[in-house]
Amino acid sequence: MKIVVDINHPAHVHYFKNFIWEMEKKGHKVLITATRKDITYELLNNYGFDFIDIGSYGNSLIKKLINIPIIDLKMYFAVKSFNPDIFIGFGSIRAAHVSYLLRKKCIIFEDTEHSMEQIRLYLPFADAVCTPACFKKDLGRKQVRYNGYTELAHLHPNYFTPNPAVLDEIGLSKKDKFIILRFVSWKASHDVGQHGITNKKVLVKELEKYGRVLITSEAGLDDELEKYRIRISPEKMHDLLYYATLYIGEGATMATESAILGTPSIYVSSLVGTMGNFVELEQKYNLMFNYKENYQAVEKAFEIIQNPELKRIWKEKKEKLVKEKIDVTAFMTWFAENYPKSFNEIKENPEAQNSFRLN
């Protein structure tokens, strides 16, 4: 089988890396296409992936709209001679469009309910859309729900083992308390008009009373905050998240990753309540806390970080989650390799996916 895997965001590298390796082990040929966003290319290079650079959509909404057909054409010419059997992407408009032009199958993964402008652009052209079971929207007959989260594709214990060496790189030990702060650029099309943490400097100063503060940010930081920026290779970030005392930030992906890793996670955004995975992680598993207002998040952070049993309690919560959810990479691999039979099987018997749960 020949597979095109499309990458449009740094997180997608993590989502699909194990899928790519698994499919290649099985003898399938994989072609990776990617657009330029933040550290996407750095991650692909660090993992040793060959990929085709098909450009950038730009930062403004107008540029993104103008570049949709341009990027579509670039991808079309990049993959046509490869003659793929199937396209795989995460919320990928271009994968859906190009697969349709080439009369090939396309499987899209999606977990962001408020990205409706994006969903409307790819849904008519995709063959299947796989979402977490807790996804709050009904996308119709093409939708398949799986019992997991996208982030379990790379953080499930079948694939992820934390490496404490990352702590040595930044002068920390397992006994040290440290807090990771995440700021986003708010330039994604689905982020227009949204906001997150306000008064960042005050937040940093308050958190420093309880431990070392480390910042990861898509946007630039002023001189006063720049000294807190994390300076490690991006593929080591999940190791750091695992050992962190607390995560607090505007980044949705990193908030979910922290919760899944058993690190207390506080998400601050005007988008709170729109995404099913965040609701479930808070209400069912109590691994995450979601706030629209900055002051609420700060109060919760101070409450959490002073609990001496923090790591033990969150480890137990995480283990419960992992036992109840599936190995998402194993599901992806089976679903793509057996498509369209797999689509019909899950539609008729959703419980069949339980075979991918941890024994």
Image (cartoon, grey):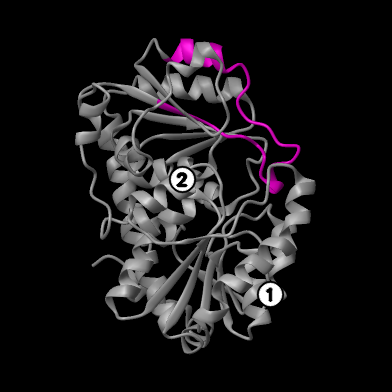
Q: Please give the name of the residue rendered at 53% of the width and 51% of the height, measured from the top-left corner.
A: 9
Q: Please give the name of the residue rendered at 19% of the width and 35% of the height, measured from the top-left corner.
A: 165
User: Quadrant location of residue 176?
Assistant: top left
The residue labelled by disc 1 is 140
Residue 156 at x, y percent in the picture: 32, 56
* Magenta segment includes 194: yes
Quarter the C terminus occupies = bottom left
Amino acid at the residue labelled 2: Thr
Query: As rendered, which of 84 and 219 lies closer to the eye?
Result: 84
In the image, is residue 192 above or below residue 320? above
Which region is colored magenta? 180-207
Q: Is residue 106 left or right of residue 172?
A: right
Residue 251 at x, y percent in the picture: 53, 38
**Which disc, if any, is residue 256?**
2
Residue 159 at x, y percent in the picture: 27, 58
Q: Please give the name of the residue rendered at 54% of the width and 25% of the height, measured from the top-left corner.
A: 297
Amino acid at the residue labelled 1: Gly
Q: SS of the residue at dot 2? A: helix
Q: How far, Cα to Cα, is label 2 from label 1?
A: 26 Å
**Which disc, if any, is residue 16?**
none
Q: Please give the name of the residue rendered at 34% of the width and 74% of the height, measured from the top-left corner.
A: 23
Q: Specify few, some or many for label 2: CA neighbours under 10 Å numbering under 14, 14-19, or 20 or more.
A: many
In the image, is residue 28 above or below residue 239? below
Q: Is residue 30 left or right of residue 177?
A: right
Q: SS of the residue at dot 1? A: loop
Res 187 seen here? yes
* Magenta segment includes 252: no
Query: As rendered, which of 76 and 268 lies closer to the eye?
Result: 76
